[in-house]
Amino acid sequence: MTLDKKHSINNILEENRLFPPSKEFSDKSNIKSFEELQSLKKQSLENPTKFWESFANSEIDWFEPFQTVLDRENAPFFKWFKEGKLNITYNCLDRHIKNGIGNKTALVWEGEPGDNKKYTYQELLKEVCKASNALKSLGIKKGDLVCIYMPMIPEAMVAMLACARIGAPHSVVFGGFSSESLKDRLIDGNARFVITADGGFRKDKVIELKKAVDAAIESGANKIVEKVIVVQRTKKDISMVNNRDFWWHELLKDQKDWCEPEIMNSEDRLFVLYTSGSTGKPKGVVHTTAGYNLWSHLTFKWIFDIKDDDVYWCTADVGWITGHSYIVYGPLSNGATTLMFEGVPRASNLGAFWEIIQKYKVTIFYTAPTAIRSFMKSGREIPDQYDLRSLRLLGTVGEPINPEAWMWYREVIGDNKCPIVDTWWQTETGGVMISPLPGAVATKPGSATFSLPGIEVEVVDKNGEKVVENEGGYLVVKKPWPGMMRTIHENSQRYLESYWEYISFKGEKNVYFAGDGARIDNDGYIWIMGRVDDVISVSGHRLGTMEIESALVSHKSVAEAAVVGRKDDLKGEAIVAFVSLEKDINSFPEIVEELKKHVVNEIGIIAKPEKIIISDSLPKTRSGKIMRRILRSLAEGEKISGDISTLEDSSVLEKLKEIS
Ligand code: ATP
Ligand code: MG
C-alpha cells in the first residue's frame, strides 16, 4: 500500500438526489444563480486583496480607514485591515439608527416561562449604552476580559455588546456548564469580572447560575475574580457578597443612555471563546474586531439571503460560536430582526420550536442536526400540528447532517419548498466557510456543497497532496480569511501545532487544517466525513464515521447512530455502532442483525458493524455533538480518560457502561 493510500479516507456512501432552488426563490435572492456565485468566487481567487478590500469598505463603517488588507509578516499570525479603527457595536447598532431603521425590531425574545420582549434598534442601543456605563462605573476598562455566564435572556446580548462597546473582550461561557468548567475558563482567561444571573430556566428546571459562580470562585477563582454583576431573572434567593457582587438593575438604573463607542483597532481582541470539546480539552479561541465583524456580517448576508422583513431565528445558545456570529453579531450588523429563545424542546413541550415559528411568523430557521434527529424521533405528528408556512429558508450547523435527517427536515419542516443551507464551520473560523447560497446552488442531502467566495478549500493527504475526486482526505483552507482565529488564548504553541503544522506541505506554508475529513465528488460538492481523529481503519480501508452512521440512520427504526473503531487483530479495527431507536421501536433481538444487514446493503460488507449496542441516548457535548472519543473508550473496554467536563449528561455514560 502506498503512503497516500494509507492516509486517504475511503468514500463509501452514494447519494444522488439533487434539489435546485425554485425559480421563484432564486429570482428574489440576493445572489440569483450559480453563474453569479462563480463570478464572485473567481474575483476572490484572482485578486483576494481587492476582493476583501472592497467588501470591507462597502459593508463595514470605519472611524478611520485601513491601509493594509492583509499583513502576512508574522504568518500564521495574520493581521487583517491593520491601521483601521472601528467599533463593532457601531456597525451593529448606531449606523442602523443613522440609516433610519432605528424603529425596526432588532431583537425578539421569548422566555421559557412564556414571558417575552422586543427591542427596536434604538432601544437596544440605549440599553447597551446604559450597560456600558455601568461596566465602566465598576472600573472595567478597554482590554479587561469579562466572563459572561448567562441564560438566554436579552441581557446576555446586551452584556456582550456592552463589553464590545467599551473595548473589553468577552468570554461567554455556556450557562449549562458546571461550576468546575466555569472555574477552568475563568482561570484560563484570567477574567476579573463576571456577568451572570441569579439563575435561568431550562427544561422545566431552574439552573442556579449565581451559586455556580460562587462555587467557582470559592474553589479556586478567588484570586482572579474581583467583581460579579448579577441579572435578576428567576428571583430566587441568592447570596450577594458586599463590594464584590452587584445587581445589574441597580447598576443600570441611573446610567445615561448614551455611551461613546470606544475606538478599537482592527486587531484588538473582541472575544475569547472555548470550543465545544468534542475531540479533547476545549481551546480558548481568540477573535479580533474588524475581520470578525466583516466575516460574520458577510456570511450572514450571503447565506441567509436576508431581506428587510425577515424574522430570523437561530436556536443556538449565545455560549457557542453559532450564537455569537448568528444570533448577535451577524444579524445585528445586517440590521436584521433576530429571535432569541430561552427554552429548548423537552418532554413536556416537544412542539416548543414550532410554536415559536407559528407565533412570530419566523421566516428563516437555523438549527442543529442533533435537534432535527430528536424531532424525527418524536414523530412528524408534532410539527404537523403547527402552522409553519411562514418559513422560507432552513439551515443546519454543528455536525454532519445525515441525508435522511436532511430529507425529513426538508419535507416535514420545509414543506418541500424551503432550501436548506448546511453550513460547515468552526469556532476557529469565526463564520461559515462551506455552504450553499440558497438561491444559487442545487443542494444534495448531506453535502455542505461549496466553499464561499473568498474561501479556498482543498482535500489533501497527510503530505499535503491534493487527493483525487471522490477520495477522502484532510480538509484544509488554503488562504487566510478575515474571520479566522488569531491564536489560542495564552497558548500560541497549540495554535501552531493544531492548525498549521499538522500536515506537512511540500513547499506550501500556512495552510489551515480543520481537523475534519472530507471528500469532493465528481460535481465538486464537498462532503464532510467526520473528524479525522475518529476515522476507522478496517482491513486497510480508512472509513469516515459519517457515512456508516448515515447508513444506519437511513433505517426506519434508527433515530441516531455513532460508530467507532475497536482494535482487532485481524482487521486492524472493527466497527462498533451505538444506536438509539425511534420512539415506538422496542429493542427486539432481531434488530441488531437487521441493522448489520442494512449497512451491508447500503454500503457493502466492508462497513458491516461487528457489534451494535442499542442505547436510549448517546453521549454528547453540551453543544449537542456526539462525543465519539468516549464511545471509543467504551468499545475498547478502557477507562474513560481525557476531558469529560463538556459532556452534557453523565448519566448517559453510566448507562452505557452497563450495557457495553
Ligand atoms: P473541539 O474542537 O473542542 O473538539 P468542536 O470541534 O466540536 O470541539 P466547534 O467549534 O463547536 O467545536 O465545532 C466545529 C466542528 O463541528 C467542525 O470541525 C466539524 O467537525 C463540526 N461541524 C460543524 N458544522 C458542520 C457541518 N455543517 N457539517 C459537518 N460537520 C460540522
Ligand atoms: Mg474543533
Image (cartoon, rainbow, N blue to C red):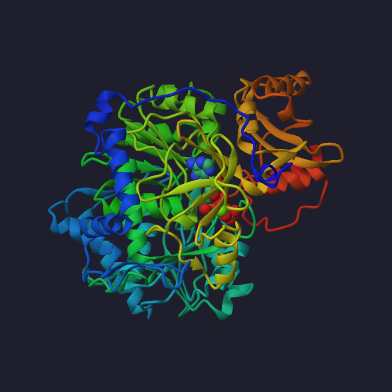
Q: Spot the residue most to the right.
A: 569
* Coordinates of residue 598 in the picture (x, y in percent): 68, 20
Instruction: Report the quarter where the N terminus lies.
Output: top right
Q: Which of these two is toward me, 224 or 460?
A: 460
For residue 211, say whether it is visible.
yes
* Coordinates of residue 572 in the picture (x, y in percent): 80, 41
* Coordinates of residue 318 in the picture (x, y in percent): 43, 54
Q: Which of these two is toward me, 322 or 12?
A: 12
Residue at image position (51%, 62%) is: 509
Q: Which of these two is toward me, 453 or 141?
A: 453
For residue 361, say whether it is visible.
no
State the image quarter where residue 603 is shown: top right
State the image quarter where residue 93 is shown: bottom left
Q: Which of these two is toward me, 345 or 519?
A: 519
* Coordinates of residue 320 in the picture (x, y in percent): 48, 54
Q: Is residue 364 above or below residue 403?
A: below
- Viewed as shown, does residue 532 lie left or right of 238? right
Instruction: Report the quarter where the C terminus lies.
Output: top right
Count of picture labels: 0
